[in-house]
Image (cartoon, helix red, strand yellow):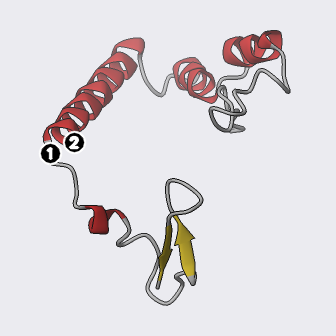
């Protein structure tokens, strides 16, 4: 499957500056990997529409449940935001923070 990013890289590059809305709409309607896989599963009799709907419903339930748990959990301590980001031994010498003046040295 090929993938396609519908949104831009970031807020400063929303994706509409280097491609047209028509291109994005065409990709959504004709080449979306999720709907493409769904079509293949249905066409080849691997799954039924009801089975796929049940899978999607369960996936949405799990995501909603985990999102609610994350929102309900306390904010991490500031120091914890910078832990367990890199595999031990592969850390950079410094890490930029939320703004260019915020630097964490190791």
Q: Which residue is mark 1?
A: 73
Front-most of residues 28 and 105: 105
Q: CA distance from mark 2 to mark 1?
A: 5 Å
Label 1 sits on a secondary structure element that is loop
Locate residue 50: give its quadrant.
top left
Front-most of residues 54 and 79: 79
Q: Residues within 10 Å of mark 2 (few under 14, many from 20)?
A: few
State the quadrant of the N terminus: top right
- On screen, 90 above or below 4? below
Q: Which of the labelled discs sits on residue 86, or is there none?
A: none
Answer with left or right where residue 1 lies relative to residue 38.
right
Residue 73 percent across, percent down from the top left? 14, 45
Answer with left or right where residue 52 lies relative to residue 43.
left
Residue at position x 63%, y 23% from top? Answer: 36
Q: Which residue is mark 2?
A: 70
Label 2 sits on a secondary structure element that is helix
Residue 79 percent across, percent down from the top left? 29, 68
Q: Residues within 10 Å of mark 1 (few under 14, many from 20)?
A: few
Residue at position x 75%, y 17% from top? Answer: 24
Residues at discs 2 and 1 in contact (Cβ within 8 Å):
yes
């Amino acid at each position: 499957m090929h993938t396609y990013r519908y949104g831009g890289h970031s807020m400063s590059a929303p994706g509409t500056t280097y491609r047209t809305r028509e291109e994005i709409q065409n990709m959504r309607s004709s080449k979306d990997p999720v709907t493409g896989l769904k079509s293949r599963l249905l066409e080849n009799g691997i799954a039924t529409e009801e089975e796929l709907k049940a899978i999607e419903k369960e996936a949405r339930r799990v995501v909603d449940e985990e999102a609610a748990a994350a929102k309900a959990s306390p904010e991490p301590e500031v120091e914890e935001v910078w832990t367990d980001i890199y595999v031990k031994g592969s850390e950079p010498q410094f890490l930029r923070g939320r703004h260019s003046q915020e630097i964490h040295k190791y």
